[in-house]
Image (cartoon, rainbow, N blue to C red):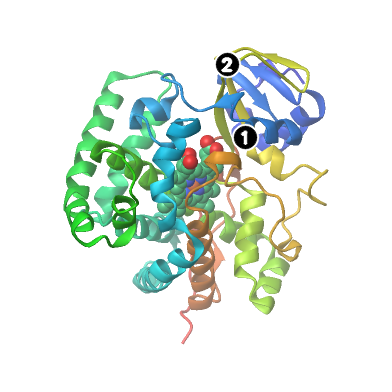
């Protein structure tokens, strides 16, 4: 295979086969299509994600930096710690369970009940997206209807994905940020007064984050918690519907969390994450230059046969899906890990519990490029509601 003949369409349609072939023949390779190095070797990926001295995220050319400004997502070393630590307590397992279990359960039930007379429906838009947006809206205390929160998200996502640097797209992102700031202001005032909730934790953490920095990091929380969770719910459902024996096993064993974990391994919502080389480096024999972009393929890591048996099979019984990297690793390991897994497991369990005869209209192919999920969405017939 000639890696530089690869196009975005190859990754989109044949991502699993392409990353497998690259891992076997070009485990660290420069790809013009990405204007950077693409890494599919598991050990090299570990180095990229864990060795913060060599591979960082702090670069003015990095799109998230341009759109959000400096935040935990795109700072290194002490500055990263300064931005992230105040947000950590609000995402610990016990806090997440206490604060969000009932909210996620009630919201899932409510949204599913609303869908009853809308079958067939789009699982992503009709359920998964609405659930993810509701939860993050509640966590941040945003004074905004969920459709508008989704609109803010869409505008930011368009700016992050805009490699043509269209000035209108950046202007729209600034507008979305202003809408977000206005919607966050009442909660910031309340949190400062009461010390309650996620932002209450942040403001009482003793950190020296400015209000602007709290705002920018809150925007990253919003950004991190929507399409990723939507994909998780849709992909898990896709996997279970395409493998009836795995669905039967999941039902029998009440293994919804394991099913979500295995779907996260099999079809990671984020296919790769980027870093900037902070100095010249050797990576699996490749000479990386300071300033080069380096992309670690999570899809390749999750399906490395050296780490997972039968990597191309969706097998719920493998338990926690072991060493999957869907939430990255190292200092940027997903802040929302506990919340995301909780949302995924509750959402999928409730879906199959309330609509036991659920079936797909069809099982569309999956796009394996930047965001992994069915091309064109997943349409489902709900069937009768369980009594
Ligand atoms: C299954 C759903 C999710 C997946 C697959 C996911 C994946 C990821 C990945 C891969 C990263 C690291 C990016 C990197 O290494 O550069 C990340 C970071 C992050 N995620 Fe998630 N995420 C999910 C859900 C969430 C949720 C629900 C939230 C919050 C509500 C969230 C908030 C964040 C934040 C704030 C960061 C930045 C952490 C840092 O840079 O220190 N994520 N996520």
Task: Indicate which label's residue lies in the foreground, 1 or 2.
Answer: 1
| Label 1 Cα crowd, 10 Å radius (few <14 / some 14-19 / many 20+) | many
Residue at x 48%, y 77% (from the top left corner): 354
Point out residue 295 in the picture as x, y percentages from the top left corner: 60, 28
Query: Dot 2, how many residues are within 10 Å of its Cα: few (below 14), some (14-19), or many (20+)?
Result: some
Q: Residue 177 at what x, y percent from top left?
A: 25, 37
Q: Position of residue 58 (x, y in %)?
A: 46, 25
Residue 377 has which mark? none
Labels 1 and 2: the sequence-earlier one = 1
At horizontal 42% and vertical 71% (from top left) the residue drawn is 98
Kind of element beneath mark 2: loop
**Percent position of residue 112, x then y:** 40, 70
Query: Residue at coordinates 22% horizontally, 49% vertically from top-left?
Result: 184
Taking 46 as reference, is 36 left or right? Answer: left
Q: Please name the residue that numbered disc 2 is placed on.
A: 292
Q: Is residue 149 visible?
A: yes
Looking at the image, the residue that sits furthest to the bottom is 387
Depth order, front residue of 276/110: 276
Q: Please name the residue that numbered disc 1 is placed on.
A: 49
Q: In the image, 347: left or right of 193?
A: right
Q: For disc 1, does the CB lie below 8 Å from ligand 1?
A: yes
Task: Check the image and report above or below for 62 versus 181.
Answer: above
Q: Who's the residue at 72% across and 56% down the image?
A: 314
């Amino acid at each position: 295979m000639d890696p530089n003949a690869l196009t975005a369409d190859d990754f989109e349609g044949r991502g699993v086969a392409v990353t497998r072939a690259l891992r076997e023949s070009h485990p660290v390779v420069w790809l013009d299509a990405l204007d950077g190095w693409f890494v599919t070797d598991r050990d090299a990926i570990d180095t990229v994600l864990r060795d913060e001295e060599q591979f960082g995220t702090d670069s003015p050319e990095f799109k998230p930096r341009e759109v959000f400004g400096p935040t935990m997502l795109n700072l290194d070393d002490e500055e990263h710690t300064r931005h992230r630590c105040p947000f950590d307590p609000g995402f610990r397992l016990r806090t997440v369970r206490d604060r969000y279990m009932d909210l996620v359960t009630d919201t899932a039930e409510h949204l599913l009940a609303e869908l009853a007379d809308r079958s067939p429906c789009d699982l992503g838009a009709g359920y998964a997206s609405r659930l993810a947006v509701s939860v993050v809206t509640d966590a941040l205390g945003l004074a905004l209807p969920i459709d508008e929160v989704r609109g803010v998200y869409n505008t930011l996502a368009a700016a992050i994905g805009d490699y043509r640097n269209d000035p209108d797209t950046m202007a729209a992102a600034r507008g979305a940020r202003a809408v977000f700031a206005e919607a966050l202001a009442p909660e910031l005032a309340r949190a400062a007064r009461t010390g309650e909730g996620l932002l209450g934790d942040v403001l009482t953490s003793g950190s020296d984050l400015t209000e602007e920095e709290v705002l920018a990091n809150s925007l990253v929380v919003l950004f991190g918690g929507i399409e990723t969770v939507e994909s998780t719910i849709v992909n898990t459902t896709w996997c279970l519907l395409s493998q009836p024996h795995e669905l039967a096993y999941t039902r029998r064993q009440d293994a919804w969390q394991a099913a979500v974990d295995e779907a996260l391994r099999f079809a990671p919502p984020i296919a790769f994450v980027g870093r900037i080389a902070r100095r010249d480096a050797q990576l699996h024999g490749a000479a990386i230059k300071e300033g080069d972009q380096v992309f670690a393929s999570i899809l390749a890591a999750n399906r490395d046969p050296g780490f997972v048996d039968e990597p191309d099979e969706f097998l719920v019984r493998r338990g926690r899906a072991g060493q999957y990297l869907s939430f990255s690793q190292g200092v940027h390991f997903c802040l929302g890990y506990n919340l995301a897994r909780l949302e995924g497991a509750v959402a999928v369990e409730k879906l199959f519990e309330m609509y036991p005869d659920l079936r797909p209209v069809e099982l569309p192919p999956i796009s394996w490029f930047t965001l992994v999920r069915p091309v064109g969405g997943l349409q489902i017939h709900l069937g009768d509601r369980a009594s």
